[in-house]
Image (cartoon, rainbow, N blue to C red):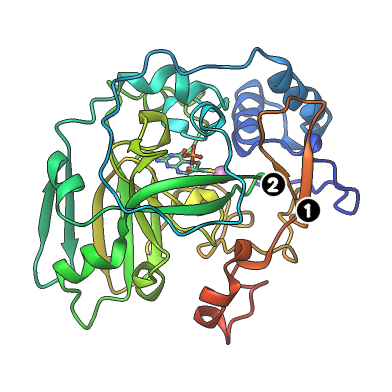
Amino acid sequence: MKIRRSNRSQFKDWQITDEHTFNNRRLLLKSLGIGSSALLAGQAQASLFDWLKDEPTAKKQRKLQTLKYSKSRESELILTPEEKVTTYNNFYEFGTAKQDPAEYAHTLTVNPWQVEITGLVENPLKLNYEDLFNTFDLEERIYRLRCVEAWSMVIPWVGFSLNKLLEKAQPKSTAQYVAFETLNRPSEMRGQSSRFIGGNISYPYIEGLRLDEAMHPLTLMAVGLYGKALPNQNGAPIRLVVPWKYGFKSIKSVVKIHLTATQPQTTWNLAAANEYGFYANVNPKVDHPRWSQAQERVITSGGIFNQQHQPTQMFNGYAQEVAHLYKDMDLTKYF
Ligand SMILES: Nc1nc2c(c(=O)[nH]1)N[C@H]1C(S)=C(S)[C@@H](COP(=O)(O)O)O[C@H]1N2
Ligand SMILES: [Mo]
């Protein structure tokens, strides 16, 4: 479907429509027999409306166990308040509004759980719930998170490098990519049983990385944040965190890790290939077709009248560590 472009030179973050709002309007209008070009007028109101709603709190939380982990080195980064990290989420399986995951994700059973590592590996593995916390030493990692919607947070994750898990599974020499899959359980995930609630994307949510990206020491499997097990809304009991890529790569509530020879499909690329590429590296110079990526809105405890913006950093500030992975690539083509 053809997507209309807005004026990119005037950056106003409240003009950015969340992916879901846009996608949902397409679905709604399609069902009403109206084309997508009539969409843009409603954008500003929709985001403002979200902002003016009451501050959500995650009330129906299961008890989160305190984790044993080694503390991160001192970080210059200013942490996003825990209450924001756990109430301003994207997890479309529970609905597309930012407060939906905090409100509805308590319906998900995370224990028992099983993650399978399969495909082109010498040693296929299965981890159960306890294994997620006991197999590897857990460490804290304070990372910036940059959503493709041009907002950002700083989150103190707890987890282990994905490369430790992959080394245990022993990738075969033919393995070149890693495919990830989120749990598919419509009975517990309201967005998976309704296309309107679930933002009109297909489930299970799938993602992928090149094997060298997956093996990079920054690439984390997170099982906690702020010193405790992950709240359901943040992707319990285990989720991927790739800090130099847009947030949608960091797939939540993972049940499958599958090594392949060919590039796997990804949910957002299937939904809109011209907007969401396989690489999705944070890049201030490559705009989203509908908005600029030059700046980002910092999520703080301040409300609508106290918003901070800052320049987007190449590879989300991790260029020194990861730029070499892409050195001969045209990043406007492989976006
Ligand atoms: N399964 C699944 N994983 C997902 C998403 C989702 O909708 N479903 N949203 C992604 C997006 S767009 C972002 S920005 C991050 C948000 O993570 P957080 O809510 O823990 O901050 O999760 C990513 N992982
Ligand atoms: Mo995102």
Q: Please name whichever residue, 330 or 233, is drawn nearer the observer in this view of the structure.
A: 233
| Residue 292 image label | 1
Residue 290 appears in the rendering = yes
Q: Residue at x 65, y 21 (%)?
A: 32
- Viewer-closest of 177 and 87: 87
View extreme (right): residue: 10
Residue 181 image position (x, y, % from top left): 31, 48
- Compared with 204, 281 (above or below) is below
Residue at the bottom extreme, as displayed: 328
Extreme residue toward the front, this view: 74
Pointer 1 with pointer 2, Cβ within 8 A: yes
Kind of residue sitting beneath label 1: Ser
Quarter of the rendered image showing ligand 2: top right
- Left or right of residue 310, residue 165 in this image: left
Q: Which residue is mark 2?
A: 150
Crowding at dot 1, Cα within 10 Å, few <14 / some 14-19 / many 20+, comes out as many
User: Which residue is found at the position 42% from the left and 35% from the top?
Assistant: 234
- CA distance for labels 1 and 2: 8 Å
* Residue 189 pos. (x, y %): 35, 25
Image quadrant where residue 287 sits: bottom right
**Which quarter of the picture shows residue 105?**
top left
In terms of secondary structure, where does tag 2 sit?
loop
Horizontal and vertical percent position of residue 46: 74, 23
Q: Which of the two residues, 32 or 43, is positioned nearer the viewer here?
A: 43
Query: Which amino acid does the dot numbered 2 rest on?
Result: Ala
Q: Earlier in the sequence, mark 1 or mark 2?
A: 2
- 283 vs 120, left or right, is right
Q: Nearer the viewer, residue 19 or 218?
A: 218
